[in-house]
Every structure is written in structure tokens, then in C-alpha cells.
């Protein structure tokens, strides 16, 4: 158990809809990262937050947004969903971006867009 | 721009033998390299890491080798066990930006009894 909690585990929705994925980092970790894994691909970095502030953006679509709340949990919002957004979405956390890795990952949310 | 590449999508090894997983990278600004292991329906689990100032790091059955001149790292598992069957991801952290991890595409390792 990595200590990173993601909900829900599975999400099935239709094209055009909007969903919210939730992540609670490990106790004491201030930095949260979101990754997307499409079928049989590597993990693609989406966005990073540190102590409530956005620190880095990767290949995140404009239809996607995220935030980190004062209690350090994070939410990833995906809107105007398309079939190609079907993927595993992972959240990871670390104490701070300056600390040596590793990142600790949650078990992911599997999103299916029909 | 694939900065971290795992060119072997799959690898099959006999139980008890050595498993060698390979990874190549292009960015000379990477300062840490990591291997993660992933089982189905679970998140990636950290396995072992190596700093760019070292060329070898060992942890039990797992050893990671780094060849900076060739921009190549490898993970050796000796002896291989059935429970090692999983997808292995190579990852690297850059000194630039917010130090996120960049992942390879993964190699599916199957250990045959």
C-alpha cells in the first residue's frame, strides 16, 4: 500500500460529459502529480502541484484541469470527454519536488468513455 | 519526443535465470533514474533507483547499472522468480523544470516455471 488513495477506481461515462477524479496523497507529502496511461503506453505526465500551487504542466489538454486543495488532496477534472480520453489516470505524491525520487503512486482510476 | 525508451515490449525468462531489462535515454539533464514494477489493476511500485553520479546500485536480487556515456541503463534481476512477472517501467527525473518523472513505455516480463 503506497498510501496514495485514488477514487473512484472505475468510471464509465459518455462522450461530451465531465468527470472529476480525486487523489489523496501520502501523509506528509506536499507534492501531487497526475499521469495518464493510455492502452499499453507509458505514463504521460499531465500536471504537478506543490502545496496548492501549480508547479509544472505536461501534455495536458485544455479540456482538462486540476487543483490541489488546502488539505492537499487533488482533483483532476476532465470535460467534453472524447473516446480517446479513455485511459488509466494515476496520481502520485512526494514530499516536495526538490527531494530525490521516488514518487509513490496510487492504484489509478480507469476511465472508459463510450 | 520520447526521452526515455524501452525498446523491448516484452521479455520471457526461465525461473532462476537472470532477467535483464534495458532502457535508453536522450536527455543529459536527467539526474535520477528509477525502475518501477506494475501489476495489473495496481499502480506502479517503486523498485530501485540510481543517481547520475553512480554507475551501479544493488538491492537484494535487483541491480541497476547506469552507463552515462551511452545514455543507457539496465535492470538485472537474479535469480528471477515467478512473482517478478509484471510490467517494468524505466523513469528519469530531469534537473530542469519541476523535476517530474519521464517514463518509458514499459517492458512486460514473464518468468516461466
Image (tube, coloured by chain):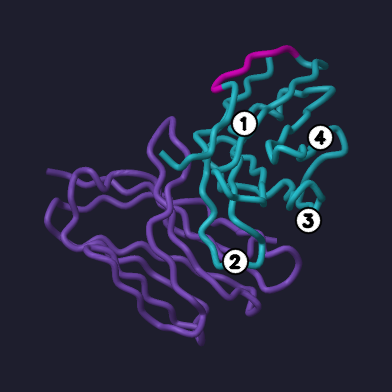
Chain colours: A cyan, B purple
Q: Is residue B107 visible?
A: no
Look at the picture and state if A37 lies above or below B101: above
Q: Callout 4 environment at 10 Å: few (<14), some (14 to 19), or many (20+)?
A: some
Q: Chain of mark 1?
A: A
Q: Is residue A55 magenta?
A: no
Dot 1 corresponds to which residue?
Answer: A87
Identity of the residue drawn at 74% across and 50% down: A51
**Mark 3 or 1, closer to the camera:** 3
Q: Which residue is mark 4?
A: A64
Which of the image's four quarters has the N terminus of chain A?
top left
Residue A10 colored magenta? yes
Sequence-wise first label, 1 or 4: 4
Q: Where on the picture, by quarter, is residue B26?
A: bottom right
Q: Badge 1: few (under 14), some or many (20 or more) residues near its Cα, within 10 Å? A: some
Residue A66, horizontal then vertical, whole percent: 79, 37
Comes first in the chain, label 2 or label 3: 3
The chain under label 3 reads: A
Q: Which residue is labeled 3 in the image?
A: A56
- C-alpha separation, residue under disc 1 versus residue under disc 2: 29 Å
Residue beneath the point at 40% across and 65% down? B22
Residue placed under numbered mark 2 in the picture: A99
CA gap, disc 4 and disc 2: 27 Å
| Tag in front: 3 or 4 | 3
| Span of residues in magenta | A9-14
> Where does the image place residue B86, in percent across and percent down from the top left?
34, 44
- Kindly state the secondary structure of the residue where label 4 is placed: strand
> Is A39 drawn above or below residue A98 in the view shown?
above
Magenta stretch: helix, strand or loop mostly: strand
Q: Quadrant of the C terminus of chain A?
A: top right
| Label 1 and label 4 in one chain | yes
Q: For the residues labelled 1 and 2, say whether their Cβ atoms are less than 8 Å apart.
A: no
Amino acid at each position: 500500500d503506497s498510501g496514495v488513495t485514488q477514487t473512484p477506481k472505475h468510471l464509465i461515462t459518455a462522450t461530451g460529459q465531465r468527470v472529476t477524479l480525486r487523489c489523496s496523497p501520502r501523509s506528509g507529502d506536499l507534492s501531487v502529480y497526475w499521469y495518464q496511461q493510455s492502452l499499453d503506453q507509458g505514463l504521460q505526465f499531465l500536471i504537478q502541484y506543490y502545496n496548492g500551487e501549480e508547479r509544472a504542466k505536461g501534455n495536458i489538454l485544455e479540456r482538462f484541469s486540476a487543483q490541489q486543495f488546502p488539505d492537499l488532496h487533488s482533483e483532476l477534472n476532465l470535460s467534453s470527454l472524447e473516446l480517446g480520453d479513455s485511459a488509466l489516470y494515476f496520481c502520485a505524491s512526494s514530499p516536495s519536488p526538490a527531494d530525490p525520487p521516488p514518487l509513490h503512486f496510487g492504484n489509478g482510476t480507469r476511465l472508459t468513455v463510450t | 519526443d520520447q526521452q526515455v525508451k524501452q525498446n523491448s515490449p516484452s521479455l520471457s525468462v526461465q525461473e532462476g535465470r537472470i532477467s535483464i531489462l534495458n532502457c535508453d535515454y536522450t536527455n543529459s539533464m536527467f539526474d535520477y533514474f528509477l525502475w518501477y514494477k506494475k501489476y495489473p489493476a495496481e499502480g506502479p511500485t517503486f523498485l530501485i533507483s540510481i543517481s547520475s553520479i553512480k554507475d551501479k546500485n544493488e538491492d537484494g536480487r535487483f541491480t541497476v547499472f547506469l552507463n552515462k556515456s551511452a545514455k543507457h541503463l539496465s535492470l538485472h534481476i537474479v535469480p528471477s522468480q515467478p512473482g517478478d512477472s509484471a510490467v517494468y517501467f524505466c523513469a528519469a527525473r530531469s534537473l530542469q523544470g519541476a523535476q517530474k518523472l519521464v517514463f518509458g513505455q514499459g517492458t512486460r516480463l514473464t518468468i516461466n516455471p
